[in-house]
Amino acid sequence: MDGRPQMTMTGMVLDAPDARELAAFYKRLLGWSATQDEDGWVVLGAPGGGAGLSFQTEKLYARPVWPARPGDPQMSAHLDIRVDDLEAASAHATQAGATLADFQPQEHVRVFLDPDGHPFCLYVD
């Protein structure tokens, strides 16, 4: 024991102009269910447990630019999503409402933007 209190990472929060709208996109993309849905706050839970994904309405939300240049609103984080079939997963992401990013830095990774501009990566192991 190193004296640290027990800590468990339970999720990640994405800001959005409308938490429910962005959560609805990730429900379509991931197939996860809402475990909490309040005004301005939605939590999606992974079916097998583990860390969830939360969405918070931010009135002053500024859509990030990826890749950003000096002066652009920067992304603060991105999601990595492992898939078994990159082409099928990419088609599904597009159908769910994602946009393929113009810049693709790696051959076996596809960078997409969710409807509010948050980047996420689909990749095969």
Image (tube, rainbow, N blue to C red):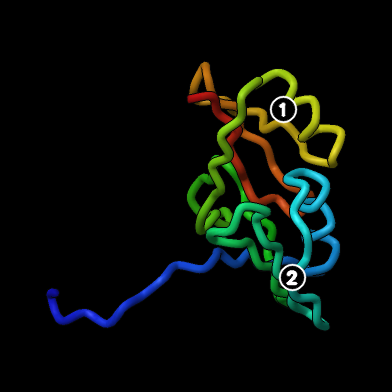
In this rendering, position of residue 96 left or right of residue 124: right
Write down the residue under mark 1.
Answer: 89
Secondary structure at numbered mark 2: strand
Q: Residues within 10 Å of mark 2 (few under 14, many from 20)?
A: few
Q: Could you tell me residue 114's position as x and y percent?
A: 73, 47
**Which mark identifies residue 43?**
none
Residue 71 appears in the rendering: no
Q: Could you tell me residue 71's position as x and y percent?
A: 53, 55
At horizontal 80% and vertical 31% (from top left) the residue drawn is 92
In this rendering, position of residue 118 left or right of residue 68: right
**Quarter holding residue 101:** top right
In this rendering, position of residue 35 left or right of residue 24: left
Looking at the figure, which quarter contains the N terminus? bottom left
At horizontal 72% and vertical 31% (from top left) the residue drawn is 100
**Depicted 15 relative to depicted 29: above or below:** below
Secondary structure at numbered mark 1: helix
Which residue is the extreme one toward the left? 2
**Quarter holding residue 73:** bottom right
At horizontal 61% and vertical 52% (from top left) the residue drawn is 48
Write down the residue under mark 2.
Answer: 35
Which residue is the extreme one toward the front? 48
Q: How far apart are marks 2 and 1 (CA)?
A: 24 Å
